[in-house]
């Protein structure tokens, strides 16, 4: 689990953020911030060697339940979770992977790609 104590997490323009599963299909990435996620234009989240945005065989509620009990489910394939205390903004031509769970709005600008799913607990998920 990775935690950010600042106001949020920004992936700079044209940057590459690599999550490497190390060949372990049971690895899980949880990125937590009490604030926001801002993925700048042309930024890319890359998943390598076993890391996956989600386990496509299951819906979000089932996957979240299985994540909570990951120690008993060794075949859970390397999901990536972004747990946000505020909003998520994915700018144009950015590529993000994983399941975004935000307290506030999630906005995907034109040309933004999300390989996974987005859930807002208190606002809308929109594509601008």
Image (cartoon, helix red, strand yellow):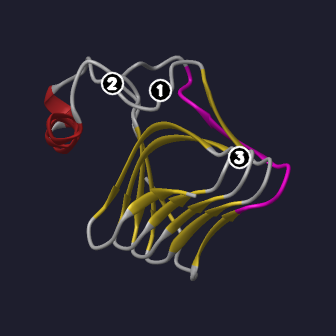
Q: Are marks 3 and 1 in contact (CB under 8 Å)?
A: no
Q: Nearer the viewer, mark 3 or mark 2?
A: 3
Q: Earlier in the sequence, mark 3 or mark 1?
A: 1
Identify the secondary structure beneath mark 1. Answer: loop
Q: Are marks 3 and 2 in contact (CB under 8 Å)?
A: no
**In the image shown, does 96 or 79 lie closer to the viewer?**
96
* Residue position for label 3: 94
**In the image shown, does 41 or 20 lie closer to the viewer?**
41
**x and y percentages locating residue 87 in the rendered image:** 47, 71
- Quadrant of the rendering where the C terminus is positioned: bottom right
Identify the secondary structure beneath mark 2. Answer: loop
Query: What residue lies at 83% left-to-right and 57% top-to-bottom?
Result: 13
Outermost residue toward the bottom? 7
How many tags in the picture? 3
18 lies above or below 36: above
| CA gap, disc 3 and disc 1 | 17 Å
Q: Nearer the viewer, mark 3 or mark 1?
A: 3
| CA gap, disc 2 and disc 1 | 7 Å
Identify the secondary structure beneath mark 3. Answer: loop
Q: Are marks 2 and 1 in contact (CB under 8 Å)?
A: yes
Query: What residue lies at 52% left-to-right and 61% top-to-bottom?
Result: 107
Q: Identify the mark at residue 52; answer none if there is no mark.
A: 1
**x and y percentages locating residue 52 in the rendered image:** 47, 26
* Residue position for label 2: 55
Query: What residue lies at 49% left-to-right and 77% top-to-bottom?
Result: 35
Q: Residues within 10 Å of mark 3 (few under 14, many from 20)?
A: many
Point out the stretch of residues depicted in magenta: 11-22
């Amino acid at each position: 689990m990775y935690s950010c104590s600042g106001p949020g997490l920004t992936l700079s323009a044209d940057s590459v953020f690599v999550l490497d599963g190390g060949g372990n299909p049971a690895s899980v990435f949880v990125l937590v911030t009490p604030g926001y996620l801002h993925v700048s234009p042309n930024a890319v989240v890359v998943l390598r060697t076993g890391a996956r945005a989600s386990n496509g065989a299951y819906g979000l509620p089932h996957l979240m339940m299985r994540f909570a009990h990951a120690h008993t489910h060794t075949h859970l394939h390397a999901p990536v979770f972004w747990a946000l205390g505020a909003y998520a903004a994915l700018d144009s031509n950015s590529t993000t992977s994983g399941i975004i769970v935000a307290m506030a709005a999630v906005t995907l600008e034109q040309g933004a790609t999300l390989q996974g799913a987005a859930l807002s607990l208190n606002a809308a998920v929109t594509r601008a």
